[in-house]
Image (spheres, rainbow, N blue to C red):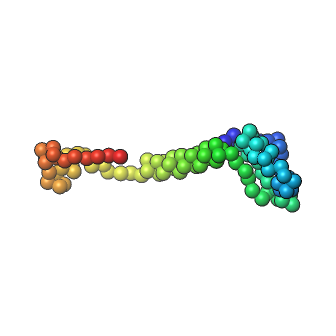
Amino acid sequence: MNALNMVNILDSIIPISQFNKGQAAKIFSDVKRTGTKIVVKNNVPECILLSPESYQKMVEDYEDALLAAEAQKRLSQTVDYATHDDILKKFNLTDADLDDVEVNLE
């Protein structure tokens, strides 16, 4: 979603009374074109209208930020990694014991 600068914000504000005057179709058309409208009631923001594309992008950006934060957290931790040989030894296995094992990863 494009960052809204001050001019975009002022252009995107619409009074809720426009819905009462039968202008919903025009407002929704504007949202599809511009991506965002801020609906105000008594000069106070009441809700924000987003196009489905803008909403999807916002959700994906949020999920990406959560994943990046989790990755950063994990990378900052000190972890002792086990090698393949360490795991085999721990469970008293050999490579031959695993030859007939089928693994499906999704």
Q: Nearer the viewer, residue 17 or 57?
A: 17
Q: What residue is rendered at 54% in x and 49% in y?
A: 63
Image spot of residue 91 (x, y percent): 17, 55
Image spot of residue 17 (x, y percent): 86, 56
Q: Is residue 87 left or right of residue 64?
A: left
Q: What residue is rendered at 64% in x and 43% in y?
A: 53
* Residue 15 makes an appearance in the image: no
Q: Is residue 76 left or right of residue 99?
A: right
Q: Is residue 39 left or right of residue 93?
A: right
Q: Nearer the viewer, residue 13 or 23?
A: 23
Image spot of residue 89 (x, y percent): 16, 51
Q: What residue is rendered at 75% in x and 46% in y?
A: 28
Image spot of residue 59 (x, y percent): 59, 49
* Residue 75 makes an appearance in the image: yes
Counting the numbered discs, the total is: 0
Q: What residue is rendered at 69% in x and 40% in y?
A: 2
Q: Nearer the viewer, residue 9 or 100?
A: 100
Quarter of the picture holding the N terminus? top right
Residue 99, compared with residue 17, is above or below; it is above
